Amino acid sequence: MCGPGRREIRSCSIRFRSSPHLAFSLKWEPGKWKSSISAMVSPRSDPGGSWQELYDIHHTMRYGPEHKKRSRRRILRRAAALFRRHGYAGVGIDRVMAAANLTRGAFYAHFPSKAALFAEVLAEESDFVRRLRSASDAREVISVYLDPDNREKVARGCTLATLTNEVPRRDAAARRAYAAQIESLASEFERHLPLADPDRRARALEAVALCVGGIGIARAAGDEELAREVLGVCRERAIAAISDEGGA
């Protein structure tokens, strides 16, 4: 019998007889399988009598920590892609778990709620930050990021640019995660600026606003010519902001 909760199946058990005197059961719960073998006996003189359980052998098979880590990463990747494409309201737990090829019940072994999952997605380091960290010249990274021909490709991989409008409507955990990513991006821009520059942080934040805001506006504009114009201006100003001759 399968026992559903209010909206999802939290556990499932199956029991069958492999012979007149032997029964086998298998029970699933999030993160583990439990099997038991039960020997039953019915008096030969009373074929219709009740069965008596003689013994149970229980064995629990739990997934290892590496399996759980891989599953969690898969859920986060699929959820990030879905949130970027459809927004918070357009994505449910069922949809995320189907995309991750996992059961809905397994979701709760990793996250307590959809809101918690969203905050975790925001906390994941963005492609933009990773590229800046490994780049010797931030101007090249900005140039690629704000290239009009890369607009949709960038949006598919940048949570900061695509989920900005979602964050104010979410909980404090989501806002903290988003703020941490903005700080991380600003820090990477600061790393490319002279330490003695008194406007170092202001210039870094200017570059952040131009990059993240530029992608968001260009995607929402609905006008290809305007989108390209916005990205062109943002790219020029962002590069100037972190160049030696630039300034806030």
Image (cartoon, grey):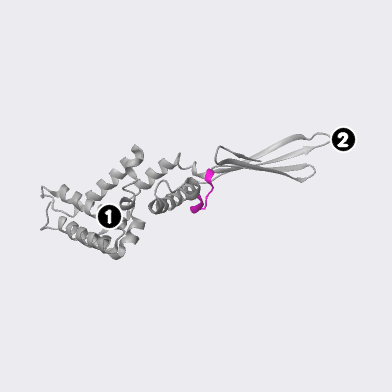
Name the residue type under label 1. Ile
Mark 1 neighbour density, 10 Å: few (under 14) some (14–19) many (20 or more): some
Residue 192: x and y in percent read 18, 55
Q: What secondary structure is found at the residue carrying circle 2?
A: loop
Q: Earlier in the sequence, mark 2 or mark 1?
A: 2
Which image quarter holds the N terminus? top right
| Labels 2 and 1 touching (C-beta < 8 A) | no
Which residue occupies the extreme right position in the image? 45
Q: Is residue 102 magenta?
A: yes
Q: Residues within 10 Å of mark 2 (few under 14, many from 20)?
A: few
- In the image, residue 104 lies at what x, y percent? 52, 45
| Residue 133: percent from left, percent from top | 26, 55
Q: Nearer the viewer, residue 147 or 181?
A: 147
Verify whether residue 237 appears in magenta.
no
Q: Nearer the viewer, mark 2 or mark 1?
A: 1
Locate residue 66 relative to residue 177 in the image: left or right: right
- Whether residue 117 is visible here, answered yes or no, is yes
Q: Is residue 232 above or below residue 36?
A: below
Q: Quadrant of residue 242?
A: bottom left
Is residue 212 left or right of 1 when viewed as pictured?
left
Q: Is residue 190 something one can see in this rendering?
A: no
Which residue is under mark 2? 46
Give the image quarter of residue 158: bottom left
Instruction: Tell me where the magenta segment starts and ends, as one range.
Output: 97-105
Q: What residue is drawn where x is 62% and y is 42%?
A: 12
Residue 119, quarter of picture: top left
Q: CA distance from mark 2 to mark 1?
A: 80 Å
Residue visible at 13% across and 50% down? Answer: 195
Q: Tell me the residue at 33%/57% (across/down).
A: 155
Q: Residue furthest front?
A: 223
The tag on residue 38 is none
Residue named by callout 1: 217
